[in-house]
Image (cartoon, grey):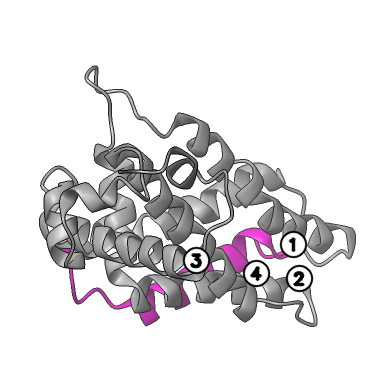
Amino acid sequence: MRSKNRASGKQELTFVEAARRAQLVDCAIAAIADVGLHRASLAEIARRAGITKQAIFYHFATRDELIHEVLAVATRQGAEFMAERSRRRPTPADELRAYIEANVEYIGSHRDRVKALVAIAMNFTDEDGRSRLLPLDASVYGDSLAPLQDILQRGQEQGQFGAFNTRTTAMSIRAAIDAIGPQLNAIPDLDLDGYARDLVELFDRATTRGRA
């Protein structure tokens, strides 16, 4: 029988429980990437994990809770991946370049995760077709833009970047990067190295003082 506290995350997980939750998240990502969000049922995820569907409820109260955990884990891991590769560089322009390149590198090396995130973002809706991710969407375009805005603001303060609205520019950069995921579904062999170079050049011209 499912433990209410375990599934809701109110008690500290044991090593075994944490490992099982991580496995279920990985299996959910693989299922969503392979068969789509709607067909990635708890039964399908359980089959991939080698457990019964009922066993999932010890760790997650509902399928929606598991989907939210997939989103949270994938987002956190992506942030950690990029933070590692875009630490402070000599100039804000170097940091912006590293930010773009790290994001594109992550997309290329974690395609299943990105495919699953795109499927969730586009299809995780209620009966009326409204996104079930509205609070998270607000966070994605709030807190997650802060590091990028910080780079742009420091570039302006140091006189390296020109005058522009940092939030608008940060959202434009983020949107250009986020557009890669859906493209990969239609163009699996998309030249990501070339895409990254183009984005770096585009936003270098858009931000550097005197080059816009």
The CA distance from mark 3 to mark 1 is 19 Å
The CA distance from mark 1 to mark 4 is 7 Å
| Circle 1 crowding by C-alpha within 10 Å: few under 14, some 14–19, many from 20 | many
Seen from the viewer's position, the closer of residues 178 and 56 is 56
Q: In this view, does 48 lie above or below 145?
A: below
First of labels 1, 4 by sequence position: 4
Where is mark 3, residue-wise?
A: 78
Does the segment drawn in magenta span residue 200?
Answer: yes
Where is mark 4, residue-wise?
A: 96
The prevailing secondary structure element of the residues shown in magenta is helix
For image coordinates 57% across by 63% down, the residue present is 203
Is residue 209 in view from this perspective?
Answer: yes
Furthest-top residue in view?
128
Badge nearest the viewer, 3 or 1: 3
Residues at badges 1 and 2 in contact (C-beta under 8 Å)? yes
| Circle 2 crowding by C-alpha within 10 Å: few under 14, some 14–19, many from 20 | many
Instruction: Please provide the residue range marked out in magenta.
Output: 186-212
Q: Is residue 3 above or below residue 203?
A: above
For image coordinates 89% across by 65% down, the residue present is 158
Where is mark 2, residue-wise?
A: 92
